[in-house]
Amino acid sequence: MATSVPSFKEQILRAKAESTTIRIRGGGTKDFYGVSLDGDILDTRLHSGITEYEPTELVLTAKCGTPLRDIESALDANNQMLAFEPPHFGEGATFGGCISSGFSGPRRAMQGAARDFVLGILLMNDNGSELQFGGKVMKNVAGFDVSRLICGSFGTLGLILEASVKVLPKPEVETTIVFELNKEQAIERMNVYAAMPIPLSASCFHDDLLSIRLSGSETAVKSGLKKIGGERTDGSDFWRSIREQTHPFFQADQKLFRHSVNPKSPVTHKNTLIEWNGSLRWIWSDTSLKEQQDEATKYNGNAILFRKSVKNDAIQTLTHGLMTLQKKVKNSLDPDGVFGKCRLFTEF
């Protein structure tokens, strides 16, 4: 599809001149997340296509509007993958949305987060200028790592025109094992397995069932199975449902909170799903963000209101120091607030 970079620049400069705001949007599959969706939509989907991909180099570069399914299809044809296992949350997910949201799936605890695989970004700033950060090789460490800063910013710091990511080979073998345990046993078992020399790639506990995924060479997986036992099952559909939040647990009519805590923390909520070796807790609750944050703070963690029903609710709380830093970053990259002011925070 034809590039639309000139029209992007025109729209950004017009918004700046008229003191209005822009909301960068691809497929809109992450529209549920955030404080506010204010701003005129800048649609990235016409700026699409994989610009560079050399399987032997394990690096892929693509434009922001490229459908995420196209990225994964190209990688799959070469038996490779996005190792952070990004969720789509819908059919229209784009590569730009994948990077700007920074969301990672079940494999994150063992392989790394989305930002860990971003090598470089071509960014359009509030002046319509194109800025290159990072590069296309792992050893490029020159300058401040703005590329990773952009990952997770939800388009509030600039428009990602293009991004380069490191990709990895798919595991030779992958299998899932399940155990019937109570929550205390599950937390203990997750921490034990995370410390063992086994090819652990995902863990999830819900409704007295602990699911463990092993991924790697046939020899490594067989060795892992011998060490931990358990009942084997085909878990591909299960892990997809956890990644995309289509699992029955996620179908509730409350506020969904996401706790990141010490993996050995006790499970204090009844309606909870646990991932990432115990460090990620999904919790349905009608309580406030402050109550959830106070609870997470007890265990050296933080809470985010991931899905909500009330518009303009805060989704996270930050200390004064962190909020001051956030404001400095925003003022440095987008001083006029062209790319929105309240997508992630109510404070600005």
Image: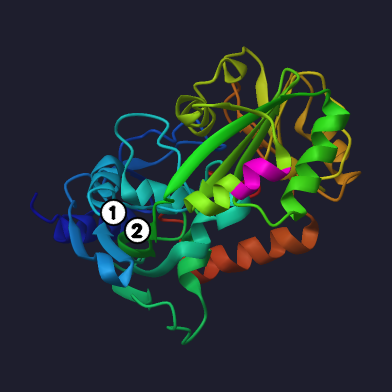
Indicate the amino acid at tag 1: Cys
Q: Residue at x 30, y 72 (%)?
A: 57
**Circle 1: element type:** loop
In space, the residues marked 2 and 1 are separated at their CA atoms by 9 Å
Q: Residue at x 12, y 56 (%)?
A: 3
Q: Is residue 263 above or below residue 112?
A: above
Tell me the mark number nearer the camera, choosing from 2 and 1.
1
Q: Within 10 angstroms of label 1, few (less than 14), some, or many (20 or more) residues?
A: many
Q: Which residue is mark 2?
A: 159
Q: Residue at x 71, y 45 (%)?
A: 227
Q: In x, y percent, where is residue 195?
A: 76, 55
**Circle 2: element type:** strand
Furthest residue toward bottom: 142
Furthest residue toward top: 253
Instruction: Kindly identify which numbered label has been placed on residue 247.
Output: none
Q: Main secondary structure of the magenta part?
A: helix
Coloring applied to the structure: rainbow
* Disc on the earlier residue, 2 or 1: 1
Do residues under tags 2 and 1 come within 8 Å of each other at their CB atoms? yes
Q: Which residues are magenta?
A: 223-227
Asked if residue 152 can be seen in this view, the reply is no
Q: Within 10 angstroms of label 2, few (less than 14), some, or many (20 or more) residues?
A: many
Furthest residue toward left: 2
Instruction: Kindly identify which numbered label has been placed on residue 64.
Output: 1
